[in-house]
Image (cartoon, rainbow, N blue to C red):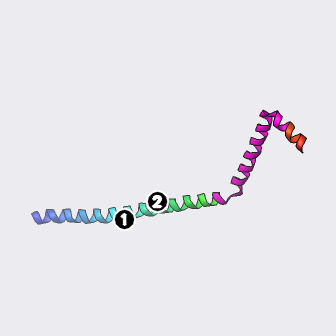
């Protein structure tokens, strides 16, 4: 009778071990896929011209604001150019 109880626990343990291993493997694959997609998207965005355009527009806007706030600088540039 004791042998039957141990056999029952052994089967459950084997089942759990296999299932746990499969679940772990499944989630490791899912995490790997998500990491790959995220890194691919970051790389794509890094190569994008949009980032460069935004930087150029930011610089232009900063220059306009600086000139608006310092009219003396505008006059100096007009006299030089």
Give the magenta range: 45-74
Q: Can you identify the residue that label 2 sits on?
A: 31
Q: Quadrant of residue 13?
A: bottom left
Which residue is most to the left? Answer: 1
Residue 51 appears in the picture as rendered: yes
In front of the other: label 1 or label 2? 2
Q: Quadrant of residue 70?
A: top right
Residue 28 part of the magenta segment: no
* C-alpha gap between disc 1 and disc 2: 14 Å
Say what secondary structure mark 1 lies in. Answer: helix
Q: Residue at x 77, y 42 (%)?
A: 63
> Could you tell me residue 18's position as x and y percent?
31, 66
- Which one is earlier in the sequence, the residue at label 1 or at label 2? 1
Quarter of image, res 72: top right
Asked whether, in this view, residue 48 is left or right of residue 38, the answer is: right
Percent coordinates x, y for residue 2 in the rendering: 10, 63
Tag count: 2
**Residue for badge 1:** 22
């Amino acid at each position: 009778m004791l042998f039957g109880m141990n056999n029952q626990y052994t089967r459950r343990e084997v089942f759990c071990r296999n299932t746990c291993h499969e679940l772990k493997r499944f989630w490791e694959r899912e995490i790997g896929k998500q990491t790959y997609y995220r890194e691919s998207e970051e790389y794509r965005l890094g190569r994008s011209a949009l980032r460069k355009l935004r930087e150029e527009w930011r610089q232009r806007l900063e220059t306009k604001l600086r000139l608006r706030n310092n009219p003396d600088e505008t006059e100096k540039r007009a006299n030089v150019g």
